Image (tube, rainbow, N blue to C red):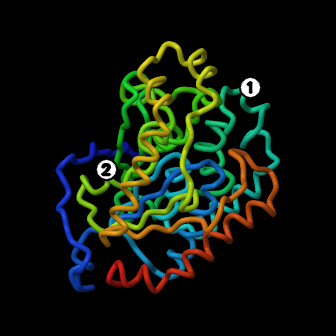
Amino acid sequence: MGMKLETAEVSTSLPKREGPRESPKLHSMKRSGLVLEGGAMRGLFSAGVMDELMEEGIEFDGLIGVSAGAAFGCNYKSGQKGRVLRYNKRFAHDWRFCSIRSLLKTGDLYGGDFCYHYFPENLDLFDQQAFNQSKMEFTVVCTDVETGEPVYKTLMEYDYEMCEYIRASASMPIVSRIVCIDGRKLLDGGISDSIPLRQFQKMGYERNVVVTTQPADYRKRHNRLMPLFRIALRKYPKLIHTLDTRHLMYNGQLDYLKAEEEKGTTFVIRPPERLNIGYTCHDTATMDRIYQTGRNEAKKHLSEIRAFLGR
């Protein structure tokens, strides 16, 4: 697919601590980040938020996305407003996009080759040039199945390997093939780091807008599919452990997110209530509803977001 991908392993330097009372002038000097949680089709909420922010000309120095947050978030760097909703509706009934037939035929519920390579290059074109020219740092989160630990990759140029990292970030266990890149075996980033605010702070992003896909009162419970995971993923005991304790990790991240929000270093955009959409969706009216909810929430908080970012 052309040029060689240049990727960078992220920095692990500790973030600078700061208090909540700072002037807008100081805000503008800090590196701003957009953090996108995953959640499969709940990610249409994030897509609505992103489109509203893009329409308002709000830019970020960097974006970190997990799972659907990565698959949809790359469109912020390429500046393609409306593309996420458009292609999800267009291919809603195409078996190659998402179906049990795709799972049985290819090993991926969301068709790996179709979703991440064929349609962005042939059917609903991804703006590769705009992505490459943008200075925004785009980072995705994956999970190493052999260690159970998160893997972070910053991707600045479009090519085949970049798309494979995004595919890995969004590859849900059992219904997706393991993606092999750079000597690692990777799956969904949400398994090991669902809301990577801490990581982005370590990378030097001190003023972050975080978009979650669950409402404020949500708490994750222990996964009822663990018996199935233990059988299907028995070759990867560390991954099984990470899956088994994921609810503890996630709820701890929610506590951290709330604390950072109260300190004034983080601005959070959440759905006002449960979005009531599954991991898959073929109903375009439901897609419109989730997307519009995201746009409405972003619009409601625009003045606060601008003040937070000093824009």
Amino acid type indicated by mark 2: Gln
Q: Nearer the viewer, residue 3 or 64?
A: 64
- Residue 105 is labelled as 1
Eyeballing the image, is 2 above or below 245? below
Inter-mark Cα distance, 1 to 2: 37 Å
Left or right for 289, reference 117: right
Q: Which residue is mark 2?
A: 199
* Residue 135 appears anywhere in the view: no
| Number of marks in picture | 2
Q: Callout 2: few (<14), some (14-19), or many (20+) C-alpha neighbours within 10 Å?
A: many
Mark 1–mark 2 CB contact (< 8 Å): no
The percent coordinates of residue 207 (x first, y second) are: 30, 68
Q: Quadrant of the C terminus?
A: bottom left
> x and y percent of residue 258 in the render?
40, 61
Left or right relative to 187: residue 207: left
Crowd band around label 1 with a 10 angstrom C-alpha radius: few (<14), some (14–19), many (20+): few
Instruction: Please name which of the two marks, 1 or 2, marks the residue nearer to the observer.
Output: 2
Q: Secondary structure at mark 2?
A: helix
Q: Toward the viewer: 275 or 120?
A: 275
Residue ID at (49%, 39%): 247
The residue lying at 56 percent from left, 62 percent from top is 46
